[in-house]
Image: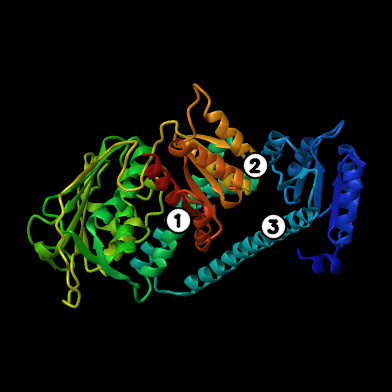
Amino acid sequence: MTEKTATELPAKLLVIDDDNYVRSSICMYMEDLGYDVVEAVSGEDGLAAIAALKPDLIFCDLRMPGMDGLEVLGHVTAKSPGTPIVVISGAGKIQDVVEALRRGAWNYVTKPIEDMAVLRHVATQALEKARLQRENEKYHAYLEEEVVRRTRQLAKSTARAKLLAEEANAANRAKGEFLANMSHELRTPLNSIMVLSRVLAENRERNLKNKQVEMLEQISSSGHELQGLINEVLDVAETESSKILLEMKMISIEGFVTRIERIASPMAWQKGLTYSIEVAQDAPAQFYSDELKASRILRNIITNAVKFTSEGNISILVGRPAENIDSRSRHFDRDNTLLVRVTDTGIGIEPSLQERIFSIFMQADGADNRHFQGSGIGLAIASRFASALGGDILLESTPGKGSSFTVLLPTRPESDEIEVRQTSRHPFSISEDRNTTVGTGRIRFNGEKILISDDDMRVVFNLSAMLETLGAEAMISGTEDGILQRLQESQRANSRPIDLIVCSRQKLTNEVCGALEALQESAPKLIVLTGDDAEDKANSEIPFECHSVVSPPSYQTIVPLIQRLLW
């Protein structure tokens, strides 16, 4: 909500705080911005005002005599979860804020409030978020009504149509199974996303404990599941269009194998399966294809293999076919063909069902979808992408013993416009190792001390949580004096020195730089968080070696850099 909107259509704001000065200051400031402000001196009065006025936004102090802010928060989230409530906490009461956010607070403000503009920003953000949620609910209700309406129209049209061929019946059965499966698949991740994301909505700024970490992991997992379903729907739409858009280029086999390993590793690990990837001696050094489409093919096949394998292993072979192959679609010349074979020890596929496995919305058995969750379109997408790339997928399967999917892709374009450059390379293989993977896969630190300091606490807490999860000892300092104190403590006897400092450029005051220079050879490594790439120039003012990372740093950018500096 902008200030202009607040003036034209005043939003009702309830301020609950037993501190007369704080409450009056907030009320006067927000009234000047055009809000219709009501105040309450206690939690009990606040609940009465909520019931009577139904405010659009609530500011609530956490520490109050009698009914405190957490109790008020519980009533609001239980009876009116769509009403944004912002908690006000005294300095140093970080655990109260964490608990409030866990219980459903939308945001928080700390006392003393040095910059009243923070209230305007928090209020605007909360009201805009509430507005978007209401619009989203209305939109979903509209979509449901539209689906019902169009479904009824389709049913009437079908009833009027007199030609009900066997293909149409089969298609309708397949669609029915697909919609039933999708309904089941969507409920679980959507419930997790809606409930847990609301509880932890603004919790990026906290140093999370184990329980909060588990909740975030559940949200992340659900988000990935939903993302996967959306991707499959988009892939189906693309494969059913008149033309599949391809971005063809030469692809390094080594880089492609790394991508495959990153796909297979977490899937197999989560299922408790062993896996291996072997690159044969005769494997081509590179091949000509669309990297995203080729990766999608392998992702769908590996996902299928892991899903239908309860125990045993997944093995992946990269090389060339043993001989020239005539598949369903074309003739493959061994010398110009890449072979990727994914073999599992799963349930296998009955011979009579092996053809339908590549049909859209189909699995080996529709009933299996409730036990082996999935939409039944992954292999169909893989088959269509392979065909678009000039390749094919072959299947060999024995019920009860497992399946082997062989992906064949051409290594060079059909025309000779692009020269295929062969490079010397040595064959390599990748086997299961839970602490090391190819490239920037799983990394584990060994208790290295890393000091983190930045004005943006979201960066601090996100980075500290990430590094602690990977085995480092993360320390936090909010001020330049804190950095100096940490450096002094680390130089004491029987204390492990700080190995690395990650901080913003603003934290490197003359005093901090002087302390680091005085340490000379024993000084910790330094990573400077910058606002953008252009700020790298500011590092030239630092009188010692440092490295820059654009803030906020991602896992892919900062963890490999830390690994390189410390190892």
Q: Secondary structure at mark 1?
A: helix
Q: Which residue is mark 3?
A: 129
Q: Residues within 10 Å of mark 1 (few under 14, many from 20)?
A: some
Spatial CA distance of label 2 from label 1 is 45 Å
Residue at 49% in and 70% down = 159
* The C terminus - image quarter: top left
Direction top: furthest residue: 494
Which tag, 1 or 3, sits closer to the chain's start? 3
Residue at 28% in and 70% down = 248
Instruction: Give percent across and percent down for residue 134.
Output: 70, 59
Residue 545 or 1: which is nearer the viewer? 545
Q: Which residue is mark 2?
A: 479
Instruction: Give percent across and percent down for residue 165.
Output: 35, 69
Q: Which residue is mark 1?
A: 229
Judge whether residue 359 can be spotted in this image: no
Residue 545 or 429: which is nearer the viewer? 545
Q: Residue 19 — which label?
A: none
Instruction: Give percent across and percent down for residue 133.
Output: 68, 57
Q: Secondary structure at mark 2?
A: loop
Spatial CA distance of label 2 from label 3 is 32 Å
Above or below for 494 versus 428 = above
| Residue mark closest to the camera, 2 vs 1 | 2
Q: Secondary structure at mark 3?
A: helix
| Residue mark closest to the camera, 1 vs 3 | 3
